[in-house]
Image: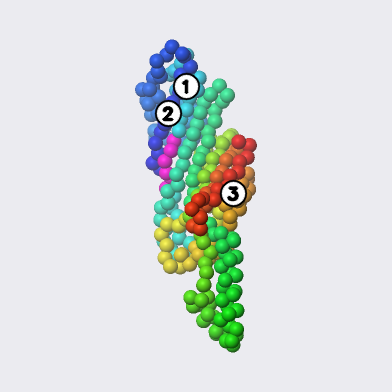
Amino acid sequence: MNAHVSAGVSLEEADARGIHMSRLYTALDTLEHQPLTPSLIHRVLSGFLESHQALSKNAYLTFGGDVLLKRDALISPLSGWKGYPFTLRSQLTPRGFQTVLEVSVGYSSTCPCSAALARQLIQQAFTEDFEEIPLTKQAVVAWLGSEEGILATPHSQRSAAHCSIRLEDSDEIPLAALIERIENALGTALQTAVKRIDEQAFALANGQNLMFCEDAAKRLDRALRKMADISGFQLKVVHAESLHAHDAVARSEWQW
């Protein structure tokens, strides 16, 4: 994982001219050579405030970057690495310690309305082409394999799910688990390395997984509500329309 870090404290003393930036910088050494956990972040933030007594009441620490996960192809033995942008925001204030994990996951979405219209056009073409042709199995199979058999296709678009969860009662940062939950709920995650057989499987998955942006938001809402050790979430899904010049967006939240 490659990440950048932003550290800060509030400045409560009106006559003070600034904070001790070097103290924040050196306090980050605590993060080296050990797993990143909420308890470790809490300890670092406490150190921020201890080094700024009488100056600060609030401390902040934010990590941002990309986590790389190895992803298998749908059918073939290929695999590849995929990056997922994430942000981990933590703060220690008089109200307590809070950590929020944000991640963005790409997926493919196929429009149900477009799929229905495509099926209608194919039905019409079938009726017209076979009006005077004997309806045999061999003739139908040949027709389905021709350009006429796929006269119209539904439009699909690259889409993105942006999810934020507030962690509670856990000393783990469930980044990989959150990504897995999101991709499983949506069903058509973006792929890495693919062969023809994988691309065909992806086309099949899209055709069997029609969804509007609000469908995607409802799926994620149900999935995140079942996630352990979180006290709330916000989510936004964005379908980058291939039909329109604007995006289709849906949002949902729980106890935020």
Residue at the outermost front position: 245
Near-viewer residue (39 or 53): 53
Residue occupied by mark 1 = 10
How far apart marks 1 and 3 lie (CA) works out to 36 Å
Q: Magenta: predominant secondary structure element?
A: strand
Residue 66 percent across, percent down from the top left: 42, 44
Q: Which residues are magenta?
A: 63-68
Is residue 145 positioned above or below 40 on the image?
below
> How many C-alpha atoms fall within 10 Å of the one at disc 1: few (<14), some, or many (≥20)?
some
Q: Residue at x 58, y 55 (%)?
A: 212
Name the amino acid type tagged 1.
Ser
Q: Is 67 covered by the magenta stretch?
A: yes
Q: Position of residue 163 (x, y in %)?
A: 54, 43
Question: For this rendering, which residue is in front, 187 or 247?
Answer: 247
Q: CA distance from mark 1 to mark 2?
A: 11 Å
What residue is at 60 percent from the left and 43 percent from the top? 252
Residue at coordinates 57% horizontally, 40% vertically from top-left?
234
Q: Comparing marks 2 and 3, which lies closer to the viewer?
A: 3
Q: Residue at label 3?
A: 217
Q: Residue furthest top?
A: 15
Task: Identify the mark at residue 7; answer none if there is no mark.
Answer: 2
Q: Is residue 175 magenta?
A: no
Q: Which residue type does callout 3 highlight?
A: Ala
Local crowd at mark 2 within 10 Å, few (<14), some, or many (≥20)? some
Q: Quadrant of the C terminus?
A: top right
User: Closer to the N terminus: mark 1 or mark 3?
Assistant: 1
Give how far across and how far down residue 141 sits, in percent. 54, 80
243 relative to 43, above or below: below
Left or right relative to 51: residue 204: right
Q: Residue at x 37, y 26 (%)?
A: 25
**Dot placed on the residue nearer the N-terminal end, 2 or 3:** 2
Name the secondary structure under disc 2: strand
